[in-house]
Amino acid sequence: MRPARLLALSIVAACGEGTDDTPDAMPIDPCELATVVPGGTCEVGLGDPFAPVAQNQDVTLELGSQGLWMLIVNARIPEGGAGRAGDFAGVTAIAKLDTGEVSSLEVSCRPRLLEATGNGYLQLESPYLLPMRPELTSKLDMARITLTLDVRDPDGNVARDVRTVVAHFPRAVP
């Protein structure tokens, strides 16, 4: 047998079938599902861990590492609804001013792992950082911002919640 062919066979044998044993591997990307159906409920919240947000609640914008003002969005989902602990959910968040103008920088579906909170709910393992468009900075303080959050599970069920908050810049303490 030629040395080059022997080397090639040795490499193939050593590498195996190329399976992905990574525990974080996402079997189904819920953001890529073509068909989704309304199903289940979710609740918009802020922070990590999840903190509920009431309609018209005052919230403080956070200054992100890239100098953009943002909301740190999270979601709470009742266990037994859309998704299960350990599932990846496709999460889409959008922020709009009262004028209907989109104030968030981007709108895209992002996969997030769901984790059990121990109280009958699931939450996002990592929050959805929702930066605001920099050209709207002068309009953000005291602005009424409507947050729309969609959470879709690997089965295509999508839950939605909509909340309006009143945004504020952090205040300096004298």
Image: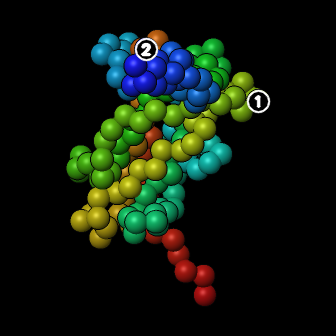
Tell me the crowding category of disc 1: few under 14, some 14 to 19, or many 20 or more residues within 10 angstroms, Cα based: few
Q: Which picture quadrant has residue 30?
A: top left
In the image: residue 14, left or right of residue 102: right
Looking at the picture, tell me which residue is in the foreground, 4 or 60. 4
Decide if residue 25 is in sight here. yes
Amino acid type assigned to the residue bearing label 2 in the image: Met
Decide if residue 168 is in sight here. no
Q: Position of residue 136 (x, y in %)?
A: 27, 63
Number of numbered markers: 2
Seen in the picture, residue 5 relative to 43 is either above or below; the reply is above
Q: Name the residue located 56 percent from the left edge and 23 percent from the top edge.
A: 14
Q: Name the residue located 61 percent from the left edge and 34 percent from the top edge.
A: 123
Q: Position of residue 120 (x, y in %)?
A: 72, 24
Q: Name the residue located 71 percent from the left edge and 33 percent from the top edge.
A: 117
Residue at image mark 1: 118
Amino acid type assigned to the residue bearing label 1 in the image: Gly
Looking at the picture, tell me which residue is in the foreground, 65 or 145. 65
Q: Quadrant of the C terminus?
A: bottom right
Looking at the picture, tell me which residue is in the foreground, 125 or 3. 3
In the image: residue 60, left or right of residue 38: right
The local secondary structure at tag 1 comes to: loop
Q: Position of residue 131 (x, y in %)?
A: 38, 55
The local secondary structure at tag 2 comes to: loop
Residue at image mark 2: 1
Among numbered discs 1 and 2, the one appearing first in the sequence? 2
